[in-house]
Amino acid sequence: MHVEPSEAVTLLSSLSRGQEATVADICGSSSLATRLREFGCLRGAALRVLRVGSTLMLQLGELRLCIRRRDAEVILVIPVLALPELAGSGLAESGLAESGHAVAQLASSTLEPVLGR
């Protein structure tokens, strides 16, 4: 399923250093998408941007992955602060939003309406 960027969904390449997000979709070639899935870049996966530039460094679970900016432009994500359940939930303020676990728990319920299911 292909998802177009919206207010909540944005390109991975547009995130800043330290920003966290949940993967919404990968829109690239099948070989790139397959390779990214092998590394754990799956719909609903939590990630953090560690470094930006011509190459982005990402934290996906226990894996650190460097990806070219042009390849990052095919990955759609939902930034943590854009998740409706985080706003006013106290998770962001309490620091729980920092854990990939908190984001992953919210992702399954949040992605369904965004992806139009």
Image: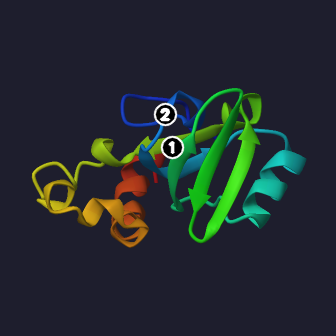
Q: Is residue 6 above or below residue 42?
A: above
Label 1 and label 2: CA atoms lie apart by 9 Å
Q: Between residues 62 and 87, which one lies in front from this camera angle? A: 62
Look at label 2 and name its amino acid.
Leu
Question: Which corner quadrant of the image does residue 39 belong to?
Answer: bottom right
Q: Dot 2: what SS?
A: loop
Q: Is residue 40 above or below residue 25?
A: below
Q: Which mark is residue 15?
A: 2
Side (left or right) of 11 relative to 70: left
Is residue 116 visible from the viewing direction of this image? no
Q: Are marks 1 and 2 in contact (CB under 8 Å)?
A: yes
Residue drawn at point x = 54 percent, y = 52 percent: 23
- Badge 2 local density, few (<14 within 10 Å), some, or many (20+)? some
Is residue 89 visible from the viewing direction of this image? yes
Of the two numbered discs 1 and 2 in the rendering, the one whose residue sits closer to the viewer = 2
Residue 91 image point, x, y percent: 19, 61
Write down the residue under mark 1. 77
Q: Dot 1: what SS?
A: strand
Residue 83 image point, x, y percent: 30, 48
Residue drawn at point x = 66 percent, y = 59 percent: 64
- Badge 1 local density, few (<14 within 10 Å), some, or many (20+)? many
Residue 101 image point, x, y percent: 39, 72
Residue drawn at point x = 45 percent, y = 49 percent: 21
Q: Is residue 99 above or below residue 114?
A: below
Residue 113 image point, x, y percent: 37, 50
